[in-house]
Amino acid sequence: MTTTNTTVKISGMTCGHCVNAVSEELSALDGVEHVTVNLVNGGISTARLTTTGPVSESAISEAVAEAGYVMLGDDAD
């Protein structure tokens, strides 16, 4: 099974509740195996997703928006 790591930038996160909300929404996406969120209070936070299948940028953006935040972009590696 091939895994892919994608890092997305997120604006508007300020606390542990924000981390939990984003982690929960992203983890619920099909194909997402693991989520790690790095909170930068007052700055641009990041979420790193490990996936085992294709997950579209729009699906990730919608999940972040559902949590109440804004995705700024991504960098696959």
Image (cartoon, helix red, strand yellow):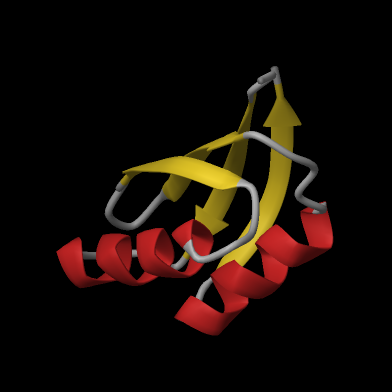
Is any atom of residue 47 visible in this view?
Answer: no
Q: Is residue 30 left or right of residue 27?
A: right
Is any atom of residue 62 visible in this view?
Answer: yes
Q: Name the residue at 41% across, 65% down.
A: 22
Q: Name the residue at 56% across, 68% down.
A: 64
Q: Name the residue at 38% across, 59% down.
A: 23
Spot occupied by residue 10 in the image (x, y as percentages of width and height): 53, 55
Q: Nearer the viewer, residue 34 or 69?
A: 34
Spot occupied by residue 31 in the image (x, y as percentages of width and height): 64, 48
The quadrant in which the C terminus is found is top right
Q: Is residue 58 left or right of residue 7?
A: right
Q: Nearer the viewer, residue 50 or 74?
A: 50
The image shows residue 28, relative to residue 40, as above or below, that is: below
Q: Nearer the viewer, residue 12 or 50?
A: 50
Spot occupied by residue 51 in the image (x, y as percentages of width and height): 61, 37
The image shows residue 47, relative to residue 7, as above or below, that is: below
